[in-house]
Each structure stands twice: as structure tokens, then as C-alpha cells.
Amino acid sequence: MTYLKPQRPVAVPGPARIDTLDGLREHLQWAIELEHATLPPYLCALYSLDPERNPDAVEVVSTVFVEEMLHLALVANLLNAVGGRPRLDTPEMLPPYPRRLPHGELELSLLPFGAEALEMFLRLERPAPPGAPAEGDGYETIGQFYAAIEQGLRHLCDRLGEREVFGGDPARQVSGAHFRHTAGALFAVEDLESALGALGEIVEQGEGTSRGEVWDGDQDIFHPDRDEVAHYYRFQELKAGRRYRRGDTPQSGPTGEELLVNLAAVPPTRPNPRLSDHAPGSAIRTAQEEFNHTYCGLLNQLEDAFNGSPKQLSVATGTMYALKAQAQALMRMPDEDGTTAGPTFEYVPPESRR
């Protein structure tokens, strides 16, 4: 099986190249933290949407979220392939929001779906400018960060050989047999070819193909008659209220069929809520604490899945349904100043979980 998509231009080297296996493993753990950091903001926007009143927005945000989960799994495969151990059930995964992307510049917040959330998602998924340098730390775009990882992988394979670089246990790989609901591919990483294929899948689903197109190279599973639009351009569709069609470019913008967004149907969820906003024992705080217990349980299930128990992914899927119900109940609870409550995504130590 050939994993590689059309070759992306090689980024100009940045000042600090990844030149040791330990450095590569460290950066891949950062990539896990990066991919996870996007999940709470996407979930807050998704949970605030009513599928009957905002079906187009639900489709876009939910498919992006599923593909971010795919990216998380691919990065875990990459880290396992080079002899690392993916860590997700740690306090570092859930610092208070607003927060910056791990080792990056962009600030993320917990917001209901709306203009402010859309602008945040567009900044998050923004394509790297042509000729942008690879940046393993302090990156401006996610594509530049992954370019630094690609650069490090190639360099280490040239210096040490693929067998030395990809010395991880193959049994820890998570494959497509454990993952569904996306046009993207989840496959085992075992050598440089499959590693570059994983990096290409992550970057192209986010910002489009290397030819500067709005498409990510896959077919849209919900609309089989058209190609799939990359994340950045899906959010451009929501902003413009139109879909991209064949012949459209990043310069033209979307010129296809109308896409309806009803912002009046979105509850005014309190931005960046925290447990400390409410007294212990209050209804909102109790509901938020329940959500946090469930979410941290999900992190534990994912960590187990990526560390030798891949069947835990199906357990994690069931936990996601519980999370959804808890979050939607929170977003119906009146808070202060005309807002509604929302999930806080705060870490609960394992010994304190229910």
C-alpha cells in the first residue's frame, strides 16, 4: 500500500532542527498536545449547535472534530513507531482556557459557535505561507510545525537509518479497523514512507493540498459527488454562507450553493467558563464537575488505546456520547448576565475521579 499523497514543497529550514531521537519523540508528544488542544474549542462550538436549526454548521464542525481525532491517532502512531509513549491523561493537557497552542503562538478559547469562534478556527487552520520556514517551536502555523517534524524525520533516517528510527513495537499501532466516520485514512506507521503519509494526511486535511487548492485530496463522505474541502476552507464556507464548487480557488472564495447559518439559534454560552465562577454545590458547578470527570475519563481511555489497548477507542466513542449529553444540558442552564453555562474542561486527578 502506498501512503504518500502529492509531495509538499520542502519548507526552508528553521533555526533549530530536530536532530536526536529524543528530540523527535519530544516534538511528537507536543504534536499530541497540539491536536488535543483543538478538541475542547471545537466541542464547545459543536455542542452549542442545534442540528435541526443549524445542520450545515453541525456537519462542518463535527467532521472537523472527527478528523482532528484522526490526526491525534496518527500522531500517536508516529510517536509509538519511533519508540515513544503517548501521554494524554496529564494535567498539562488541560491548562485553563484561554490558552495558547502548545509551543505555538495562537490563543484558543472556549466559545459557542459564532463569528468569534469562526475567526479563531480560521486562524488555527490557516495554511502556511509559501516558502514559510519549518518551526519546531514558537510556530505561526500548524503546517510549519509539522514541516519541522518531517525535516527531523528525514534527517534522522539519513543519519541513523530507518530501522534505528522506527524501532517501536508494531503491536501499539492503531489502524483503520479501530476508526470510522471520516474520509481520512488511519494506518499503521512503520517506516519513513508511512510516516510522511501520516504527516501529509494531517496537514492537507487542515489547510489543503500542496497545489494551493481548497480540497484536501479526499472525497466528501457526506456528499460523494464532490471532493472534500480542507478544514480552513470549510470554515470559510461557513463565514461566506456558500460552498466551494469545482473551479473555485482560495482567491475566488466559495461560489457554489448557499449554506445556511442561523446564529440566532445558538445559545449565548459564557466564554471560557471555570469552576471557580460558581460556589461548590451549586447546580452549574456540580454539572461542570460531572463533565470534567467524564472528559478526564475519556483522556484515560485514549491513552490506554494508544498504549497497547486499541479496543479502548470504541469505549471512548461511548464516552463521547455521554459528554455530549452532559454539555448540552449545561448549555441549557441559565448563568449570569443573560448567558448560559458551559463545560470548563478542567483536569481531575485519577484518584479524585468518580
Image (spheres, helix red, strand yellow):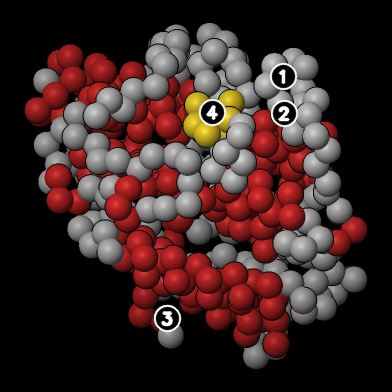
> Residue at the spot x=61%, y=52% of the render?
62
Give the residue type that dot 4 points to. Asp
Seen in the picture, residue 178 relative to 328 is either above or below; the reply is: above
Give the residue type that dot 3 points to. Arg
Q: Nearer the viewer, residue 264 or 338?
A: 264
Q: Earlier in the sequence, mark 1 or mark 4?
A: 4
Percent of width and height locating residue 208: 56, 25
CA–CA distance in space, label 3 to label 1 = 50 Å
CA–CA distance in space, label 3 to label 4 = 40 Å
**Residue highlighted by disc 1:** 248
Disc number lying in front (3 or 4): 4
> Residue at the spot x=34%, y=23% of the render?
4
CA–CA distance in space, label 2 to label 3 = 45 Å
**Residue highlighted by disc 2:** 244
Give the residue type that dot 2 points to. Tyr
The quarter of the rendered structure image containing the C terminus is bottom left
